[in-house]
Amino acid sequence: MFEYDVCIVGTGRVGLPLGLSLMETGALVTGVDRDAALRDQVNSGKMPFQEPGYTELVGTRRFQIHDSPSVIANARALVITVGTPLHNHIETDLGQVRSVLESIAPHLRPGQLLCLRSTVAPGTTTYVARWLERHTKLVLGRDLGLAFCPERIVEGKAYEELRTLPQIIGTQDAASAEAAAALFGRLTNDLLHSDFVTAELVKLFNNITRYVHFALANHLALVSDTLGANIFEIQRLTNYKYPRHGVASPGFTAGTCLRKDFGMINEWTPYPDLLLSAWKMNEYMPMFIVQHLKQRTQIFERRIVVLGYTFKADSDDTRDSLVPKLLRYVERELPTELRVSDHHLPDPIVDPSYGTARNWNAKAAIEDADSVIIATNHTGYGNVLRELCVRRPDAWVADLWNVGKIGKVFYQARELAGLE
């Protein structure tokens, strides 16, 4: 009756690893995506982004992506993994979800399961259910299954976590629950059943908890430096053999999940709250780096180097990175030159949120640097800092991630001498 077991609708950083992992279990999987460049890469056997564990799987070329949604008529289960951003104001943008529904509706058939996997605001799956009831003749729970099954993987660990993390399955009827369990049971036996809104909130609460936790760490870093104290020493003493929840390390907290998901909750209340405060704190960190570096050294008419551009370590994902914001704040100080280096990205770096920037080799970039800002904690930057110590010992370093292992946010490169 169906040619494919699964069709992934939206084969980006969430959908593609899921599709390849399901394929590895023996499922017949295909995909649909409007990005022609992505389709060409995957269909030719190449990963379009960094995600360890999938090179050989995509190289088999057994997972093929189509441009036409008509292929979904041949799949028993459909998994939607498109983007769910916020509008410029605190308002959920359902545009991509609605666009997908409009494109797939003519091809839906009785006996299929429609699984929404994108991170969504509370009530979105109910919206999808009502939309399907209005625009199709299929009866949910009888002709068509509907589930919300959130992904909770960390980018860079998809291959492992798709098989080890429990899978939440949100449904409103027994038939949908059974179909969703059969699909995700291919990857894990640890299945947790709930309703639509509970499953939606589980995903949001996971991300919001981390976002607030990091905001507190960033707030403590700001307070410590303002009072002339060292956040890393405070963290060490605070956490040492203390049996309750410890202080996290500071850093730029961004990315397409953590940075926007608070808004999907805040949309529902007009009052200032802890989540908005956490957002403001995390968003302030680029300004903190620039302002507190200026308290120690001059940026105006100096050569400044920023190491790292992506939103997290050892990734090529620039989405919602705070580094463009940092670069704009540095530019306001009118340095002689601002150099950017990130060995996980091509040269030049082209980003809609910033424009085009030359991507320097890190060692060449620091050759005559006056200050170096560690914007992303990529592997290898520790070696770059040790070389800076030799070449430019008087250069100032802003190291919110503690890449230099010196236990300070701001220091001169000479302090790295003798450290392993």
Image (tube, rainbow, N blue to C red):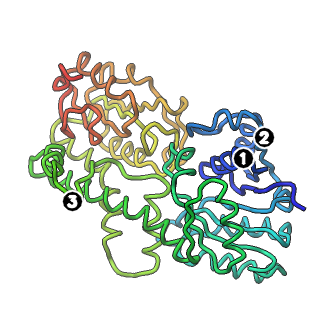
Toward the viewer: 305 or 233?
Answer: 233
Q: SS class of the residue under badge 3?
A: loop
Q: Distance between the residues labelled 1 and 2?
A: 8 Å
Q: Which residue corresponds to the image point at 45% horizontal and 48% vertical from the top-left?
A: 321
Mark closer to the chain start, 1 or 2 = 1
**Mark 1 or 2, which is nearer the eye?**
1
Q: In which quarter of the image is the C terminus?
A: top left
> Residue at 86% across / 62% down in the picture?
73
**Residue 131, image x, y percentages:** 72, 79
Which part of the image, by quadrant, shows the N terminus? Answer: bottom right
Instruction: Provide the secondary structure element on which disc 1 rests.
Output: helix
Residue 132 place in picture, x, y as percent: 75, 78
Contact? badges 1 and 2 (CB < 8 Å): yes
Q: Provide residue 178's location: percent of width, then percent of height.
A: 69, 71
- Residue 366 left/right relative to 136: left
Residue with the mark numbered 3: 244
Q: Height in image: 82 above or below 51?
A: below
Mark 2, residue position? 62
Report the side of 201 relative to 128 (left or right). left
Q: Is mark 2 on a helix, strand or loop?
A: loop
Question: Which residue has dot 1 on it?
Answer: 23
